[in-house]
Amino acid sequence: MPSYKPLFSKAIASNPDRIHFAAHSHHLWPDVTLDAQIQCWTDGVQLADRKWDKVFGEVYPAAQRNVAEELGLPDPGTIAFSPNTHELLVRLFSAHPKKGALKVLSTDGEFHSFRRQGARWHEAGNIELTRVACEPFDSFDERFVEAARSQPWDVIFLSHVFFKSGRVFNRIEDLAELASPDGCWVVVDGYHSFRAIPVDLSKVADRVFYMAGGYKYAMAGEGAGFLHAPPGYATRPEVTGWFAEFGDLQAPTPGGVGYTADGNRFLGGTFDSTGIYRLNAVFDVHRAEGLTTADVSAKIDALSRRMLDKIAAGEAGRLAEAEILNPMSNGARARFIAFRHPEAQAWKKTLMDNNVITDVRDDVLRAGIGLYHDDADVDAFCAACARLL
């Protein structure tokens, strides 16, 4: 596959000596995102009061179509955007029709947005939270589905790809069988799967919520969190903003608070649309280059194999001592390699101090590979590990 470094020339030139292997955490932005940022500003000053006509008439619908096409969703209108997924999470839970504490099934490996909020809701008595342990990894899918079937739940919430281990959950269709508008809601956190692995929700789009955003593998940065909300589910979020009034409102009673039937029922208040401009720009440049998520994944898998081979050959120093939590044998996988080692925190600091960028979660060092990497970058990373660790 050809090199795509020219698409990222500004980001690379901004720090040419940096060895950046945190594409899973803060993916470098392609040059077109700067053009998109400027376009958003230009529209703001040129159109002024009419800016929102363009945002909701062109930019927002284009982003909905881009996400829907990527995920195999039949209707782009089920997508709602927000500055971050946490806002969408809160609105979603506020819409559940059950009174009293919700019975929630989740895992001990969720990202901090749900981990913290879920723990606080549990502490306050708003939910009864049950967590399934992610380890042992090889039996997780079966154990989680068994727990989901074991009793009626109000919400089932889990990651599609786990942010710490990079393991993929492969039983979404089994969970969808349990979903109903007035009973169990299935919510999939797709932040580490959206544009990281090919995702097809066409068979479950009418029963499963899916939330993700532009921050990581979509290469668009902050401000473009989104939620796919199946029709008929969560129709009246209690936490709501005035942007949810735009469109064809359907009030439950005369004079009541109305909501649209589409994804816009999850909108909040005024937001910065820059992230959505950037998201569309990245989709556009990928189309121009003929790149699909499967293409990018294939490139990154090849680079991952190269890294693992070099580590096994002793060319990355002490990195060979680490346990690899998401080996290549597991099929679809995250775009990072998760290395578990007692010294992971110290390793990350040493690398960062020498402008080699990774990140760490507890005792797991994560090295993320992106579209802007080539063989030479993998070689440089391994050589730096051999020299520094």
Image (cartoon, rainbow, N blue to C red):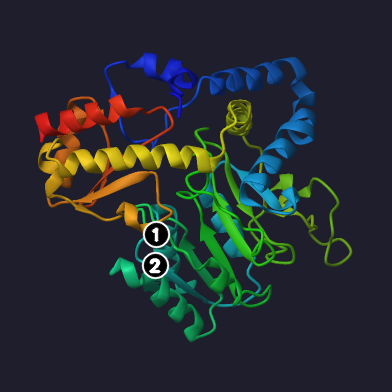
Q: Secondary structure at mark 2?
A: strand
Between 287 and 211, the residue placed more toward the observer is 287
Query: Can you tell which quarter of the image residue 165 is in?
Result: bottom left
* Residue 335 screen position, x and y as percent: 39, 44
Residue 268 visible to the viewer: no
Q: Nearer the viewer, residue 371 or 345?
A: 371
| Disc ID at residue 107 | 2
Q: Position of residue 149 (x, y in %)?
A: 50, 82
Residue that mark 1 sits on:
110
The secondary structure type at the circle numbered 1 is loop
- What is the three-letter code of the residue carrying label 2? Thr
Residue 310 x/y as whole percent: 20, 38
Q: Residue at x 80, y 58 (%)?
A: 258
Where on the picture, by quarter, is residue 47? top right
Residue 20 percent location from the top left of the image = 31, 29
Q: Quadrant of the N terminus?
A: top left
